[in-house]
Every structure is written in C-alpha cells, then in structure tokens.
Image (cartoon, rainbow, N blue to C red):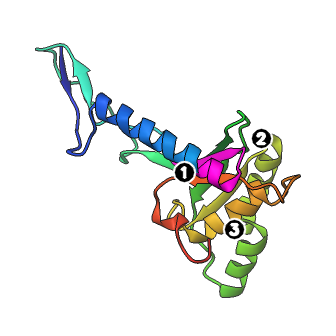
C-alpha cells in the first residue's frame, strides 16, 4: 500500500497537542473562576463539502490510475457555524452559502435586512427550509464568515437567554472576522 497526502509544516505531534490541550484547559478553568462563569459556549465554523474530489489516495502499489469525471470543480462547499455549550446542549446550525448580491442598491439593502442577503426568488425556497429544519441560512458574496455575520450570530444564539444577568464564556475560534470593534 502507498499513501500520498499533503502535509503542513506546522502540524503538531500527538504529545504536543495533548500538552497544549491541557494548558488551554487550565487557562479556561482559571478564567471561568475569575469571571464567575458556570457555562462555556464553543462556536466555530467548518466547511461542509459536496462533490469533494480528494487530494490524497490510498492505493495498492502497481495498480492503475482510473480517472473520474466530475463537474470540473474541486469541491462544492457551504460554511457551517456550530455552537454548543459545556452542559451538552447543541444550538441550531448557522449556514452560510455563497450568493450574488442584487445589483440595485435599494433591493440589496432590503435583502440584507429581511432575507439574509438572498434574492427574492431564492428566498422563497430558503425560508421554508429554515423553519422545517430549525436552522439559520444566510448568504454572502464570499460564502464565508465575516464581521456582519458575527454581529448577527451573537443575538441569534444569545439574545434570548433566560438569565441575561448570569455571565457566560463564549469561545470563538481564531478567525479575524470575530475580532473587530463591532463584535
């Protein structure tokens, strides 16, 4: 058997990853005590792939290459923001799809406010899907997370908490769209 795969130079060995995890765990618990927090929320984005053509293969030595016909693209993807808490509760998915904005400025601002940046025709399909599956689907030109989505994400998950006076700790992954003045 032969295995080919891309590697990163900065990948950690399992022992180093375990050490880093333990150090983070201690730091998070200290911060929880300092802030008087009982519940920790963890939110992070991840791509969801459709029609993904893998870049690595595992084959028996000496076997022949078989070419696979595809759509011409390496992958079709949507971005999914996941959120959960330390008590085990999982929150509704927040899905971001790549869409083109309207060319008319007035229509574009209306789409941003009312239809999560979707065009009117597409919104007729998206709105029932949101209600049926208890998820939030929005679109943007990049199909990726940004500052505006973070600003909308926070009240979506945390705006209706029963005990707003009780502090919580939200862990956001290391992405620049999370760390702006508006957020």
Residue 181 is at least partly visible in this image: yes
Q: Is mark 3 on a helix, strand or loop?
A: loop
Q: Could you tell which of marks 1 and 2 lies nearer the N-terminus? A: 1
Q: Nearer the viewer, residue 106 or 56?
A: 56
Query: Circle 1 is placed at which residue position?
Result: 79
Q: Nearer the viewer, residue 150 or 22?
A: 22
Q: What range of the chain is rendered magenta?
A: 31-45
Q: Residues within 10 Å of mark 1 (few under 14, many from 20)?
A: some
Residue 81 is at least partly visible in this image: no
Q: Residues within 10 Å of mark 3 (few under 14, many from 20)?
A: some
List the single residue furthest toward the left: 62
Q: Which residue is drawn at 36% across and 45% down?
A: 74
Q: How crowded is mark 2: few (under 14 residues within 10 Å), some or many (20 or more)?
A: few
The Cα atoms of the two marked residues, 1 and 3, are separated by: 19 Å
Q: Where is residue 35 in the image (x, y as percent from the top left)?
A: 67, 55
Query: Circle 3 is placed at which residue position?
Result: 119
Instruction: Indicate yes or no whether the magenta region holds residue 175.
Output: no
Answer left or right for 131 relative to 168.
right
The quarter of the displayed image where residue 63 is located: top left
Q: What element carries label 1?
A: strand
Q: Position of residue 161 (x, y in %)?
A: 84, 54
Q: Could you tell which of marks 1 and 3 lies nearer the N-terminus? A: 1
The C terminus - image quarter: bottom right
The N terminus - image quarter: top left
The quarter of the displayed image where residue 75 is located: top left
Q: Nearer the viewer, residue 181 or 114?
A: 181
Q: In the rendered structure, find residue 133 and report the number of the disc placed on it.
A: 2
Callout 1 touching callout 2 (CB < 8 Å): no
Q: In this view, does 68 lie above or below 119?
A: above
* Tally of numbered discs: 3
């Amino acid at each position: 058997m032969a295995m080919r795969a891309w590697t990163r130079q900065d990948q950690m060995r399992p022992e180093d990853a375990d050490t880093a995890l333990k150090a983070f765990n201690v730091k998070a618990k200290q911060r929880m005590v300092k802030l008087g927090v009982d519940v920790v929320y963890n939110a992070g984005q991840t791509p969801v792939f459709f029609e993904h053509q893998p870049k690595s293969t595992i084959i028996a030595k000496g076997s022949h290459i078989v070419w696979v016909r595809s759509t011409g693209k390496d992958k079709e993807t949507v971005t999914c923001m996941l959120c959960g808490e330390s008590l085990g509760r999982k929150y509704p998915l927040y899905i971001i799809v790549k869409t083109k904005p309207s060319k008319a400025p007035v229509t574009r601002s209306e789409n941003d406010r009312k239809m999560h940046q979707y065009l009117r025709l597409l919104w007729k399909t998206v709105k029932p899907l949101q209600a049926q599956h208890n998820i939030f689907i929005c679109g943007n030109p990049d199909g990726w997370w940004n500052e505006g989505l973070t600003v909308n994400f926070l009240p979506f998950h945390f705006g209706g908490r029963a005990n707003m006076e009780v502090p919580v700790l939200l862990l956001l992954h290391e992405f620049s769209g999370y760390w702006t003045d508006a957020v």
